[in-house]
Amino acid sequence: MWRYFTHNNTYRYIDVLQDLIYSYNHSFHSSIKMCPCDVNSNNIMTVWTNLYDRRSKKLSLENPKPNFNVGDYVRITKYKHVFQKGYESNWIDEIFIISSIIDRSPWVVYTITDLQNEPIIGTFYERELQKITYNPTSQHKIDKIIDTRYSGNRKEVLVKWKGYPDKFNSWILASSLKEI
């Protein structure tokens, strides 16, 4: 739901509630290793085994395999306070790139860089990263317009990008701005 709220810039979900439920029930769940709509009385023991069998989980910890590759685009988790709203996004808006994979048995950790290729200090576990599809030519949300200038007869604006630090502020043509 939060993805829908963010993408459509609204908190009204009643219009798409049936679509959200359908999507949830027809998407793959890693805990049961199938879609909820595929569960029936014939495979209920398989689902139970996938959820509660400790032996299969123990075997999977012995040979860690990285879920991310070098060059993948990821987001990192937000630090949440005790009284912070649970329905808000758990991931920061800034996008990072996996720069290396380090095997520290029984876990795999990753080092990352930002989009300007500056390394981020520290290493990150898989549970702290979320893989995303990123298109550098896609539209990005603007937090605010900081300044305006004219270059010849073209108007340019200095923008602060939403979710990015000040080092990413940039001048863009005012004509390329679009209302959301």
Image: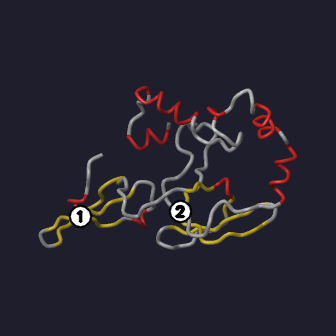
Q: Is residue 48 above or below residue 108?
A: above
Name the side, left or right, on which 20 lies relative to 82: left
- For the residue pair 135 and 56, the one nearer the viewer reads as 56
- Whether residue 71 sits left or right of residue 149 in the image: it is right
Label at residue 173 = 1
Q: Is residue 43 above or below residue 173?
A: above
x%, y% of residue 120?
Answer: 58, 68
Q: Residues within 10 Å of mark 2 (few under 14, many from 20)?
A: many
**Amino acid type assigned to the residue bearing label 1 in the image:** Leu
Q: Are marks 2 and 1 in contact (CB under 8 Å)?
A: no
The vertical placement of 5 against 58, above or below, is above
**Residue shown at 75% from the left, 68% from the top:** 103
Q: Say which mark, if any, is on residue 90.
A: none
Please tell me which of labels 2 and 1 falls first in the chain.
2
Q: Quadrant of residue 150?
A: bottom left
> How would you rate the neighbour count of disc 1 (Cα within 10 Å): few for under 14, some for 14-19, many for 20 or more?
some
Picture residue at 84% right of the left edge, 41% below the top? 53
**Kind of residue at badge 2:** Tyr
**How far is mark 2 from mark 1, CA to CA?**
27 Å
**Image quadrant assignment for residue 151:** bottom left
Q: Which residue is mark 2?
A: 73
